[in-house]
Image (spheres, rainbow, N blue to C red):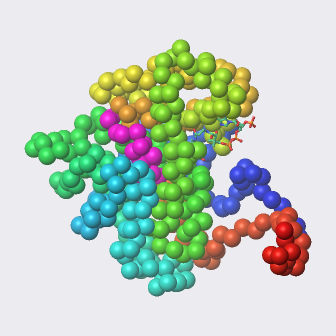
């Protein structure tokens, strides 16, 4: 192990790739997708247009977007057998467990996804056929992410599955698939569809977070992208990462009223509790997404009604951002602090919140996966080393001599 040095805990300052996709400045609180500030994209773009930007590097022309949207929406349908798959879960299975499994299940449909069939050739050669195959898999995963998530939702709610009418937008179709209860003239609320689309866009990518790293680590063995995305889902599920939006609401419910905030913060300082929705590995001043989400929340509350937890969330936020314990540790609200209040106001069940993070995030995972597959000289398997600090050579001891 000559010359090897253990990276800082949690890869604190280890860069494993060069990327042209997303730029974060943790000190300045800056987030840009392919150079475009997130604030401008949230104002002017849509989740699907931003998906095109993240994947292919440029904002699409009208025709490019029309074709991309047509492909994604075409691939949003799933095989009828998927109903049997989802019906195999208990009604109260966590939707993230269902979604994680569903992506691996999805891979079982596509022969070209069988890693042993493709070996080193399919992905490491940027031939036209390989590129088309790669893009078709990307359309399938983005298109089906909403359908699979909606099926998990319907299982969770004990409802039948629905087939959407043609012509809905990506996010409206997602709302339709979840909320349609057989009403003839059902139309997803445009305000809620727009708010969800902004949230999707804000969650689309965030460079090498834990789940994106997992997708790249997994994909570097040239396994199919469905399996790599399933691995990413498993990582995102954790309460330190995408599970934080669910943890924030559980935290707010446990605090109850604003007057209980000081006691809660004392418990956090005693390390008895974690302030979910605060802190970030990269953002040390502010998470730019949290400001946009906070404003979006006000829009949603106008339509869906205010959440009684909002007062407690605001009291907690206002106390923590002034409290030296958090200020000295440079802990600020992150993307998850306010998003859960929006999902709750929209009527989603609590354990569905991480799914609402995973659905848009498959775009960022796939953008990085495509970048890795296209890299010059082909893919190199990710195989870090260790510094061995264990026992030296020793001989086997028979059990009778071990007493
Ligand atoms: C996401 O990486 C990404 O980009 C992720 C994400 C994305 O878009 O993909 O942005 C999405 O995952 C946002 C983060 C959601 N998670 C949470 O809100 C969970 C609560 N946050 C913490 O678990 C924590 O802040 C992390 C996991 C987010 C970051 O952890 P780090 O970078 O390893 O920071 P750390 O644990 O070294 O903390 C530094 C100090 C420590 O204090 P000391 O022990 O040194 O005295 O701050 C403390 C920590 O104990 N601390 C907290 C805290 N977060 C850190 N103390 C109380 N509450 C917290 N939330």
- The front one of 323 and 366 is 323
Compared across the picture, whether 395 is left or right of 109 comes to right
Task: Estimate the x, y position of residue 307 in percent, counting from the top left.
Answer: 38, 24
Compared across the picture, whether 257 is left or right of 29 comes to left
- Which residue lies at the image location 35% right of the left edge and 26% below the top edge? 301
For the record, the magenta segment spans 346-361
- Which residue lies at the image location 35% right of the left edge and 31% below the top edge? 345
- The front one of 394 and 151 is 394
Residue 172 visible: no
Task: Estimate the x, y position of residue 156 in percent, counting from the top left.
Answer: 32, 48
- Which residue lies at the image location 44% right of the left edge and 35% below the top edge? 340
Ligand 1 found in image quarter = top right
The part of the image, by quadrant, that contains residue 280 is top right
- The front one of 242 and 12 is 242
The part of the image, by quadrant, that contains residue 323 is top right
Is residue 352 in the magenta section? yes
In the picture shown, does residue 300 fall above or below 234? above
Task: Estimate the x, y position of residue 343 in percent, counting from the top left.
Answer: 38, 36
Task: Estimate the x, y position of residue 54 in percent, counting from the top left.
Answer: 48, 55
């Amino acid at each position: 192990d000559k010359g090897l040095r253990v990276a800082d805990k949690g890869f604190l300052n280890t860069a494993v790739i060069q990327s042209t996709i997303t730029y974060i400045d943790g000190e300045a609180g800056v987030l840009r997708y392919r150079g475009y500030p997130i604030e401008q994209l949230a104002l002017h773009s849509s989740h699907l247009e931003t998906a095109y930007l993240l994947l292919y590097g440029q904002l699409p022309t009208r025709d490019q977007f029309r074709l991309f949207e047509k492909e994604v929406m075409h691939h949003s349908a799933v095989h009828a057998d998927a109903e049997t798959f989802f019906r195999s879960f208990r009604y109260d299975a966590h939707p993230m467990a269902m979604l994680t499994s569903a992506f691996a299940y999805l891979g079982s449909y596509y022969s070209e996804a069988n890693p042993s069939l493709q070996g080193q050739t399919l992905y490491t050669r940027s031939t036209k056929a390989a590129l088309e195959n790669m893009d078709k898999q990307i359309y399938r995963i983005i298109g089906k992410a909403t359908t699979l998530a909606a099926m998990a939702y319907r299982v969770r709610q004990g409802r039948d599955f629905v087939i959407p009418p043609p012509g809905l937008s990506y996010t409206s179709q997602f709302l339709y698939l979840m909320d349609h209860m057989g009403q003839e003239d059902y139309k997803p609320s445009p305000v809620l569809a727009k708010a969800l689309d902004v949230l999707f866009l804000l969650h689309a990518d965030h460079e090498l977070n834990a789940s994106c790293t997992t997708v790249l680590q997994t994909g570097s063995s040239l396994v199919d992208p469905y399996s790599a995305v399933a691995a990413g889902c498993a990582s995102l599920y954790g309460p330190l990462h995408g599970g934080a939006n669910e943890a924030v609401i559980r935290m707010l419910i446990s605090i109850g009223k604003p007057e209980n905030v000081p006691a809660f913060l004392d418990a956090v300082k005693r390390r008895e509790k974690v302030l979910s929705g605060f802190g970030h590995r990269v953002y040390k001043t502010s998470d730019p997404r949290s400001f946009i989400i906070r404003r979006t929340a006000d829009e949603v509350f106008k339509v869906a009604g205010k959440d009684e937890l909002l007062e407690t969330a605001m009291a907690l936020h206002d106390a923590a951002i002034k409290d030296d314990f958090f200020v000295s540790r440079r802990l600020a609200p992150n993307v998850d602090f306010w998003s859960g209040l929006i999902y709750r106001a929209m009527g989603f069940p609590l354990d569905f919140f991480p799914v609402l993070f995973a659905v848009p995030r498959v775009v960022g995972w796939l953008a990085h996966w495509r970048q890795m597959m296209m890299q010059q000289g082909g893919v190199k398997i990710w195989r870090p080393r260790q510094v061995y600090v264990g026992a030296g050579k020793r001989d086997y001891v028979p059990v009778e001599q071990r007493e």
